[in-house]
């Protein structure tokens, strides 16, 4: 049988949003240690508190360099589309960045009401922090296909990168 078509969406590698939302989602993380531009104990300290370093040849820049394992989206028997690894993944390794449109939770609830409730219609939202949500319904990354699981083998990990919250 022919393979079903991937649901239509604009593939993005960075979040988008209004200037106001983008300004409000910046954060100064006082826990960051200054990076020396090469890996040192400072980088380990940053990694321990989910902060990426910002310069040089430092290895603690996975999100900035988009150094993710190879994955693919494909249909699943019971949950629509899912994200699957093409290579072995080490414990603690980042799979993909969840990217989409940054919106306020009030906009999120408005969009939910507009959509109505259909259990067969997939939902592509991820809480960022505070009152902010990432909506990957129309534009986003392949992370939108990471499914809920009763036996999860991955976890949601918020990071701070150059003063921006990222997931």
Image (cartoon, rainbow, N blue to C red):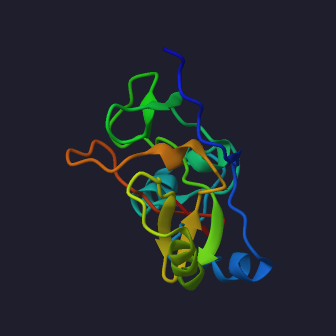
Nearer the observer, 34 or 121? 121
Residue 39 appears anywhere in the view: no
What x and y, as percent, mark residue 22? 71, 75
* Res 109 visible: yes
Quarter-wise, where is residue 15 in the image?
bottom right
Residue drawn at point x = 32 percent, y = 38 percent: 78
User: Would residue 102 appear left or right of 91 to someone viewing this image?
Assistant: right
Please give the name of the residue rendered at 48% of the width and 70% of the height, measured from the top-left corner. 116
Q: Is residue 33 above or below residue 59?
A: below
Taking depth in this image into account, of 50 and 145 the one nearest to the observer is 145
Residue 23: where, in percent of width, then height?
A: 72, 80
> Foreground residue, 80 or 104?
80
Image coords of residue 163 (percent x, y): 64, 71
Q: Nearer the viewer, residue 127 or 47?
A: 127
Q: What number of labels is visible? A: 0
**Which quadrant of the view contains residue 153?**
top left
| Depicted 167 relative to depicted 150: above or below | below
Q: Is residue 40 above or below residue 93?
A: below
């Amino acid at each position: 049988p022919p393979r079903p078509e991937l649901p239509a969406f604009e593939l993005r590698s960075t979040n988008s949003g209004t200037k106001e939302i983008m300004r409000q989602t910046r954060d100064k993380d006082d826990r960051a240690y200054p990076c020396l531009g090469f890996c040192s104990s400072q980088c380990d300290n940053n990694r321990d508190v989910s902060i990426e370093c910002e310069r040089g040849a430092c290895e603690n820049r996975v999100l900035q360099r988009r150094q993710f394992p190879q994955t693919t989206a494909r249909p699943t028997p019971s949950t629509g589309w899912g994200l699957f690894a093409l290579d072995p993944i080490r414990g603690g390794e980042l799979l993909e960045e969840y990217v989409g449109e940054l919106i306020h939770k009030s906009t999120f609830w408005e969009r939910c009401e507009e959509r109505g409730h259909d259990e067969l219609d997939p939902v592509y939202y991820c809480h960022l922090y505070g009152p902010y949500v990432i909506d990957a319904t129309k534009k986003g990354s392949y992370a939108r296909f990471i499914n809920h699981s009763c036996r999860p083998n991955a976890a949601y990990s918020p990071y701070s990168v150059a003063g921006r919250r990222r997931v």
